[in-house]
Amino acid sequence: MFPVLPLTGQRLEPVLVNDAAPTRSEIWMPYGDVILQVESTQFRINKDILARHSSIFRTLFSVPQPLNEPKLEGCPVVQLYGDDAKDWALMLEVLYNPFRHQQAQPTFNVLAAMLRLGRKYDITQAYEDALSRIHHEFPSDFMAFQDLNIDLTRIQHHHGICFDLLNLLFECEIYTSIPLLAFCCIRDNGMEAIVRTGVQRNDGSYAMLSADIKLRMALAFGRIASFQLRSLLWLRDESVIPHRSCQSPTHCAQQRNRMMGIVDQDHEGRFDLSYTIDEWDGRWTRMLCAVCEKAARKTYDQKRAEGWKLLPTFFDLPDWKDLKDL
């Protein structure tokens, strides 16, 4: 699952303190025995913390170092390339304060750091914790989806988080949660936000999808809309309502037309795609006689299950059974 760095025989790379005018971070442990430098930020930490959680660092620290290597405050300095200093600050907070993290809903930035660095450096517990939260919020199992709370419960919410998460899931190749998350992005925001405007975050910035994801979403929108139109054809004819045992066929036929009217309502200029996989619309309840409502619910649930089965393919992903995280 994790990329393995070529560490055999590798030594800790010394970094000259005045080479890039590094800045000392707030994470500066007085008894730390190694300094990580990420971009121009330095973190003084304990080797044991990293070695305990990461097989990559455990291997790295096991390589003997030359006695005359340059040090800073008595500590070797390890340069980490291609990482974000903010990610490392958040990851180290998680590693040094695990109990506080486990009892809280992590912010998106914390979750992203756990996934990116956990994946790259085989920090297994952090990676799997973040992954389990993603899988809980956006499951690949239909039964789990039906039991899902409408709000996020294991990740801290902010406006635009679905767009931020979708970019992150593609970046980290967490494909099993992409179909439901991508569907939610389309259902809840519409194509204008997806393709052009983005979604404004709480801090005033905008969450925007990457260009390749925008194209994928635009194609998916047409496929989902086409499927939903086909799946609701029973509201436009008499194949299901009135049921053959209905005692008030004229009334139920009229109510069926009203149900279709609810589907066709304008939703702030957006086409409502919630009928693809979402549960029975509560506004439909008791509009029909008991016999017709039972028949309608059965048909709706069958179509809903079909929509779920096809969900990954709408986004050019493999079927559920072949969909895997990398």
Image (cartoon, rainbow, N blue to C red):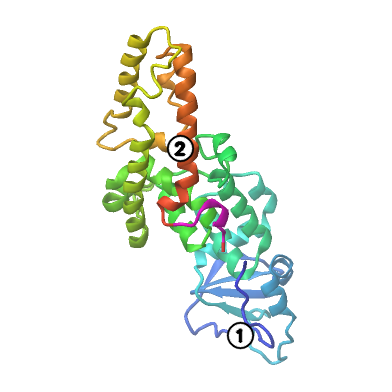
Please tell me whether mark 2 sits on a helix, a strand or a loop. loop
Residue 25 versus residue 201: which sits nearer the camera?
A: 201
- Magenta-highlighted stretch: main secondary structure? loop
Position of residue 231 measured from the top left corner of the image (x, y, whole percent): 39, 35
Name the amino acid, label 2.
Ile
Which residue type carries mark 1?
Answer: Glu
Q: Disc 2 marks which residue?
A: 277
**Would you say 230 lies left or right of 51 here?**
left
Side (left or right) of 95 relative to 37? right
Residue drawn at the location 35% of the way across and 54% of the way down: 208
Q: From this viewpoint, which residue is outermost toward the top?
A: 247
Q: Magenta residues? A: 317-325
Q: What element does badge 1 sit on?
A: loop
Residue 190 as seen in the image, left or right of residue 167: left
Residue farthest front in this picture: 244
Q: Is residue 110 visible?
A: no
Whether 235 is drawn above or below 163: the answer is: above
Answer with the quarter of the image where residue 34 lies.
bottom right
Residue located beneath label 1 in the image: 13
Q: Which mark is residue 118?
A: none
Please indicate, yes or no, whether residue 299 appears anywhere in the rendered image.
yes
Within-10-Å neighbours for mark 2: few <14, some 14–19, many 20+: many
